[in-house]
Image: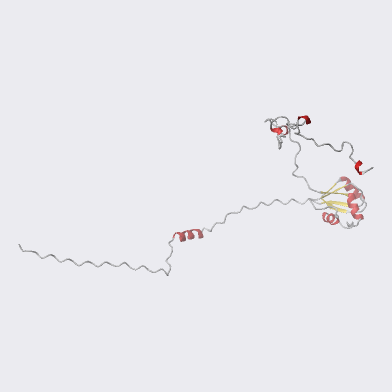
Amino acid sequence: MRLNELRDNPGATKARKRVGRGPGSGKGKTAGRGHKGQKSRSGVAIKGFEGGQMPIHRRLAKRGFTNIFKKDLNEVNLGRIQSAVDKKTLDPKKTVTVEALLAAGIIRRAREGVRVLGQGEIKTKLSFEVTGVSTGAQKAIEKAGGSVTLVPMPKRAPKEKAAPVKAKTAPKSEAPAKAEEAKAPAKKSAKTPAKKPAATKKAAPAKKPAPKTKK
């Protein structure tokens, strides 16, 4: 075999559709989009529209619900715990708690608690303090000589509402005082010269009576 003889399997590649190349190509003129109309244009996505009537996704009933009381727990199998004991990352003499599982690398992060499941085999005697345990896991732990103590799940901290920010207002005692100061006329500074008193006009001398003439 030579390089020029290498080729894909038959049907692995498909020729690209060339549209708008004349009537002889079979995809000329409207290029397979039909005639006129909104859907013959690009960028149109009419998915749930049914001519104005109620679309089917709104006519059908809803299914399912979201459980607001769902517990977010870490699920750990017995086989995973036994392998950690064999690798000596988990101390069998200490109680198996969330902190111990985190330190051993069995769980990545602590959630609302830990639930032990029965997949795998447990050979070591261990004492557990966990949030939940399956029936099969509890029987396997007790058969190996261990014990299980259920710890209540920690309560979720309520979300704190941010207190509304109130606009700062001046105290009542200061507000009228400032208003009076604004209304009062500005005091004259010491540098401004005092106005001179207006000069008083001298009284005009009384006119003497004219002498009487003899007839």
Of residues 73 and 45, the one nearer the viewer is 45
Q: How is the image coloured?
A: secondary structure
Locate residue 150, reporting x and y percent: 83, 50
Locate residue 82, reporting x and y percent: 91, 52
Residue 199, compared with residue 96, is above or below; it is below
Would you identify the image quadrant in which residue 70 lies? Answer: top right
Residue at the far left: name it.
Answer: 215
Of residues 103 and 127, the one nearer the viewer is 103
Q: In which quarter of the image is the C terminus?
A: bottom left
Residue 43, compared with residue 103, is above or below; it is above
Task: Please say whether residue 3 is visible from this viewpoint.
Answer: yes
Would you identify the image quadrant in which residue 15 lies? Answer: top right
- As drawn, is 175 to the left or to the right of 161? left
Locate residue 44, reporting x and y percent: 71, 36
- As drawn, is 165 to the left or to the right of 129? left
Name the residue located 93 percent from the left edge and 43 percent from the top edge.
2
Residue at the far right: name it.
Answer: 1
Number of marks in the rendered image: 0
Locate residue 116, reporting x and y percent: 85, 49
Of residues 158 and 19, the one nearer the viewer is 19
Name the residue located 89 percent from the left edge and 54 percent from the top edge.
84
Name the residue located 90 percent from the left edge and 49 percent from the top edge.
79
Would you identify the image quadrant in which residue 66 lies? Answer: top right
Task: Please say whether residue 173 is visible from this viewpoint.
Answer: no
Q: In which quarter of the image is the N terminus?
A: top right
- As drawn, is 158 to the left or to the right of 115? left
